[in-house]
Amino acid sequence: MSPLRLLALFALYAAMLAPSIYLGDSGDMVVAAWHLDIAHPTGYPLYALVGKLATFLPLGDVAFRLNLLSALCGVGTIALLAGFLRKVGYGRGAGMAALLFALSPSFWHEALIARVYTLNLLVTILALRAATTSLALAFFLVGVGMGNHFMVVLAIPAILVLHVAREGWRGIDLRRLVLATTFFLLGFSLYLYLPIRSHFGQIPQGRGDPASWGAFLDVLLRRAYWKNAYVADVQTFARAALDFLTGFGDEFGMFGALLVVVGLGEALSRRLPLALALLALIGGNFLLMADHGSAYDLFETHRYYLTAWLSGSLLLGIGAHVGCRAAEARLRPGFFRLLLLLLGMLLLLPQVLRAPSFLREAFFPRDYGFDLLLPLPQETVLIVEGDNETTLCGYLVHVERFRSDVTVAEGPYLDRAWHRRRLPPDLRGFSPLPDGRSGLYLHARAHGYPVATTKGDPAALPFGLVHLLPGIRPPPGREQEIYRNFREVAIPSGHEDPLITAVSDRFALLARRRGDAALLAGNPGAAVHFYEASLRFSPTRGRVWQNLALALSRLGAPTEALRVVTRGLEEEPTNPEMLLARVLLLIEVGREEEAAAALSRAERFAPSDPDFLTRLEAARTILRPHPEKR
């Protein structure tokens, strides 16, 4: 691609960048770069070092600078992708392939936030490009790239195939293999950063203590993550494989996926080594994820398949090259250019319509972190378990120095001695859930300030949904100040990010709990407020529609309650509780004929629950004609 086009692409990315910190691992990576810390396994030393350079940019906050680094790496990847296609003789399709990959949903999303994936793809395509000239250089780049993400190791089979295609089998002699291995280990030595950094100085948020050999291997091999594998048999493998294959259509559109198939056919028939190299990347990516990926990793997000999508875009470029040559040979120049324009619009329009434009207004992750930390008393120890909450709070405390008096600890690591050492001395023997209950707790500390602990519900903190253990009270004068309602930040709509869905679902659940509490306390007005807030966060919750209708009915607004139940039935048309609620509300507003019709539907989906059947019989009794009316 020309420098002008690359500049335009960077301008597009820059205009859509997330304005600050994002969800998931974003906060962890920014802390690692700012403090030269150790991120979650595998530690990501290359990202920490390169990211540290990006933090010196005099633009925005620290998180924004790391978002900008992702955009720069993304543009670099696109430039090298187009260059690789030209180098292997398929330059006519290079521009189309580069642009389609640049605007593919997974890659575009990752180019706008502070995570490791665009840097990983940049190193991967660099290594493939180097394989066409130097085996040792390609292996060195893979070794260095593993300091950012282990997925780059998938390039090794492809590199070997490309090298054999260039040099022949004689190019794989012992001397060259030893030299390549030496250069790989030289690049991989970047991981010495972990024990060195662990030995010198306090690590604000490092996950692991790689100072010992065993702990170093724990971090390097991600041992804690392998127990979550989804694929366990042929059936789950087939389901994962089907989702993976349909992912090419999700990323490139139907016509883009067709060009991938055309490109694969061309490469298999004319450039077999190149086809094998690209298939090795695709197959290796899937098999690696199938071996240890969780259900979330495999189905909820496709960013872990970005190496396969990169390889697919190269095949797409080959297919586009073949198509261009065939059309050019058969059409007049004017018709050919018109066809090219129409095809480009056909390919790019679906990508543009799915643009992650919501990210440029994504202030809510930072606001969410602020609202978790703001209500805490001074010197609280906050022990959380969700990645979103851990990394957001860690970023605010360790980078922006907001509530730097708060100690953020991670529940899953409290049984590790290295993590306990980061707690205040009076809490190093602390047990997070002494009575085995889940939920949020406050515990007394020697000087009167509490430790807040949570299991699965960290967002409950600003809602005040907290169990105070017997005898524990907040510091004097703070009883009414510690907890406040979560302000209703703008959760974006039209997104496809499961991390946002997880947060909005959590807000919906917590707002519903507040509504339930208000309803039980005899305050239907407050209940309506919280139920409506819950539905703004997540409208697909049948119980909330039902309870909102109940609260409105108690406020003397049966017509409005009926409208709410009808809306809820659009989401869950066979929900028996809402079907029965509609019957009773129709009776209340005097529409008995409609109520009788609704009753038959409620009877059809009635559960065997005795309480429900009793209420259903009561509705039948009300609708049964009286003798004097016969």
Image (tube, grey):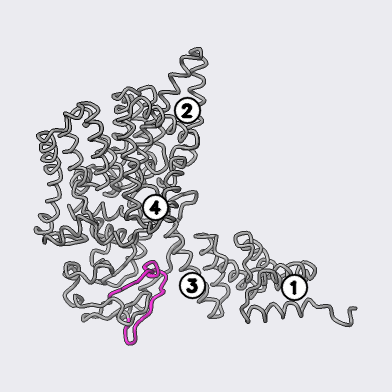
Compare marks 4 and 2 and give the one earlier in the sequence. 4
Q: Quadrant of the N terminus?
A: top left
Element carrying mark 1? helix
Residue wearing tag 1: 587
Residue 298's disc is 4
- Using the numbered discs, state the Cα–Cα distance from disc 1 to disc 4 in whole angstroms: 49 Å
Q: Earlier in the sequence, mark 3 or mark 1?
A: 3
Question: Please, is residue 22 above or below residue 322 in the view?
Answer: below
Q: CA distance from mark 2 to mark 1?
A: 58 Å
> Which element carries disc 2, helix, strand or loop?
helix
Q: Is residue 127 above or below residue 453?
A: above
Q: Report the span colored magenta.
A: 451-473
Q: Residues within 10 Å of mark 1 (few under 14, many from 20)?
A: some
* Amino acid type of the residue that numbered disc 4 sits on in the rendered structure: Leu
Image x and y of residue 209, in percent: 16, 62
Instruction: For mark 3, give the secondary structure.
Output: helix
**First along the sequence among labels 2 and 1:** 2
